[in-house]
Image (tube, helix red, strand yellow):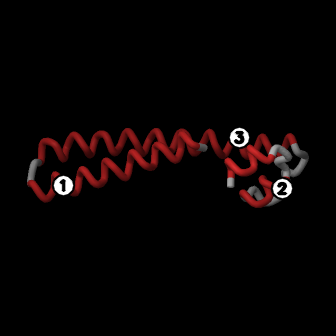
């Protein structure tokens, strides 16, 4: 989950850099940032797919595949308080 958050933070940084390059009119740097942004979006998409698979697997393991797969429901199955706080 933290990796997904980190990837989004990086994407925001790229976006901010793009804004600056647009203001400065540097199309070459902007083009490079656009390529970085595309790669970052692909990484986020891959990581999100992995997250979805893990959540589905978790609910199946808990014999709760009919439950709505929300964080609230997921937290109800976590006994370890440290893990629970981390997810919250």
Question: Is 69 situated left or right of 41 in this image?
Answer: right
Assess disc 3: are there few (<14), some (14-19) or many (≥20) residues with their C-alpha within 10 Å of its C-alpha.
few
- Which residue is farthest right? 63
Report helix, strand or loop for mark 1: helix
Q: Residue at x 33, y 49 (%)?
A: 13
Front position in the image: 46 or 22: 22
Q: Quadrant of residue 53?
A: top right
Query: On the image, numbered disc 2 is attached to which residue?
Result: 76
Q: Quadrant of residue 16?
A: bottom left
In what quadrant of the picture does the C terminus appear?
Answer: bottom right
Assess disc 2: are there few (<14), some (14-19) or many (≥20) residues with their C-alpha within 10 Å of its C-alpha.
few
Task: Tell me which label, 3 or 1, sits earlier in the chain.
Answer: 1
Question: Is 78 situated left or right of 7 in this image?
Answer: right
- Which residue is farthest front? 82
Query: On the image, numbered disc 3 is attached to which residue?
Result: 54
**Number of marks in the rendered image:** 3
In what quadrant of the picture does the N terminus appear?
Answer: top right
Front position in the image: 67 or 16: 16
Disc ID at residue 58? none
Dot in front, 3 or 1: 1
Q: Quadrant of residue 51?
A: top right
Q: Residue at x 24, y 50 (%)?
A: 17
Task: Tell me which label, 1 or 2, sits earlier in the chain.
Answer: 1
Across and down, in percent, residue 71 comes to 72, 57
Task: Tell me which label, 2 or 3, sits earlier in the chain.
Answer: 3
Question: Is 44 situated left or right of 15 in this image?
Answer: right
Q: Residue at x 28, y 40 (%)?
A: 35
Report helix, strand or loop for mark 2: helix
Across and down, in percent, residue 82 comes to 75, 44
Query: On the image, numbered disc 1 is attached to which residue?
Result: 20
Assess disc 1: are there few (<14), some (14-19) or many (≥20) residues with their C-alpha within 10 Å of its C-alpha.
few
Dot in front, 2 or 3: 2
């Amino acid at each position: 989950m933290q990796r997904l958050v980190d990837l989004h933070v990086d994407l925001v940084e790229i976006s901010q850099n793009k804004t600056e390059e647009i203001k400065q009119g540097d199309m070459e740097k902007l083009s490079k940032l656009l390529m970085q942004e595309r790669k970052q979006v692909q990484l986020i998409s891959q990581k999100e797919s992995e997250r979805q698979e893990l959540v589905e697997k978790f609910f199946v393991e808990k014999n709760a595949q009919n439950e709505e797969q929300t964080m609230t429901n997921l937290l109800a199955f976590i006994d370890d308080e440290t893990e629970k706080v981390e997810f919250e």
